[in-house]
Image (cartoon, grey):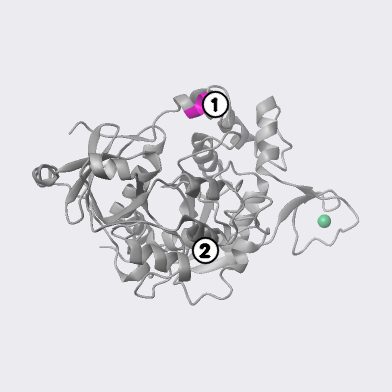
Amino acid sequence: MVDNALSPHGGRLVERVVDNKEEALKLVESCRSTLTVRGQYARDIVNIAYGFLSPLEGFMNQEEMESVCRSMTLPDGLLWPLPIVLDVSDEEVARRKITKGQPLLLEYHNVPFAVMHVEDIYDFDQQAMIKQVYGMDMADHPGIKWMHSYKDKFLGGPVELINPPIFQDPYADFFYTPRQLREKFARRHWRRILAYHTRTVPHAGHEGIMKAGWFQHNAKAILVSCAVGEKRIGECIDETVLLGHQELVKSGYLRESVCLVSMLLWDKRYAGPREAIMHAIIRKNTGATGHVFGPGHAGVEGFYDKWAAQAAFRDLPDLGIKPVVTREWFYCPHCGEVAYSGLCGHTDVNPEYFSEEGVCSMLSTGVKPADYMLRQEVFDTIIGAADRYGFGDGYVTEEYLQRRNPIFTLAKF
Ligand SMILES: [Zn+2]
């Protein structure tokens, strides 16, 4: 029985996975055309199929996409911040005979993966989308660059996952569907759960955010949710992020009875405030009751104010998950410890701020950052994971992008 105090966004947990092989085969046979999807779409499909994106049942049709971009709501008025769309070229539509009203087989790595019931094939106004979602139109913004790469049209319609992902090492230890998470929470009698979103190895500043959030939310537990997916050079590799957080639990800095490390397939959209709202909705769907937001959440340096994501929640109606905001943690030489900007008054000394780049660059030299910055056990784990998964580096290199272990594979169909 799934017992959780919080209902999914829109009231119902979407599950669109066809487990029955015969049924799946029938679905495949009904398809007249096939489209190959790339990694990001495969990850979106998994998210839709298991309900991380409830109430979405597929990729957005024109009405949904336009409503979301314009007013941040689905057509029925439910709050929804980001377009979830599938792009396709005119040439592909013609060559593959993709037709409205017909089922379309979506292949990933040359294997049947999902079936989409194509409801809509539509043009979109790229400039309007960019302005509405990002609130700016700077061409060098990574999220905007990504939108610029959209092909001619979007396909809209519900999808069904027919070939569930087989998660690989170490991801298999961290992937739980929203249903599985809700069941886990219920078994552990966790009713107030604070979600924490991350894409980096945990330094002391992150630990501070989690702990402050836990206190502020009066939470029973912390759900660490590591965003795994597309990475850019210089970022932490996915494996170090997962294993680094797991190490915090293993070494007792966060006790196992109050912390669960999990993963989310998510390619960062760099959409600052709107993306923060998306993160909250996704974690609401997994059963969390609060979501902590530290400084600079989901933003890109130079494009969004450090507190933009936190401010995004100010004028929103009740989302059904509590946004918990914390200020900054840094090392204060006067306090002689990691201090909180809301409390430490030593304005006469230079605090040492933590940064992902700072930790990553230290890792690249193999020199361990100071104890107050990074736990010894976490450092050791990161170095081990770097050797095992990162070709010697704990951060993303060209080689990692080319040769990284797959997050998941698919069974032959
Ligand atoms: Zn101080």
Residue placed at 47% from the left, 26% from the top?
A: 402
Q: Amino acid at mark 2?
A: Gln
Location of residue 64 by image quarter: bottom left
Q: Position of residue 49 (x, y in %)?
A: 28, 52
What SS does tag 1 mark?
helix
Residue placed at 91% from the left, 56% from the top?
A: 348
- Image quarter for ligand 1 equals bottom right
Task: Say above or below: 106 vs 413.
Answer: below
Q: Position of residue 319 (x, y in %)?
A: 46, 72
Whether residue 399 appears in magenta in the rendering, the answer is yes
Closest to the observer: 163 or 202?
A: 163
Q: Is 253 displayed left or right of 5 in the figure?
A: right
Q: Which residue is mark 1?
A: 398
The C terminus lies in quadrant: top left
* Range shown magenta: 397-401
Q: Amino acid at mark 1?
A: Glu
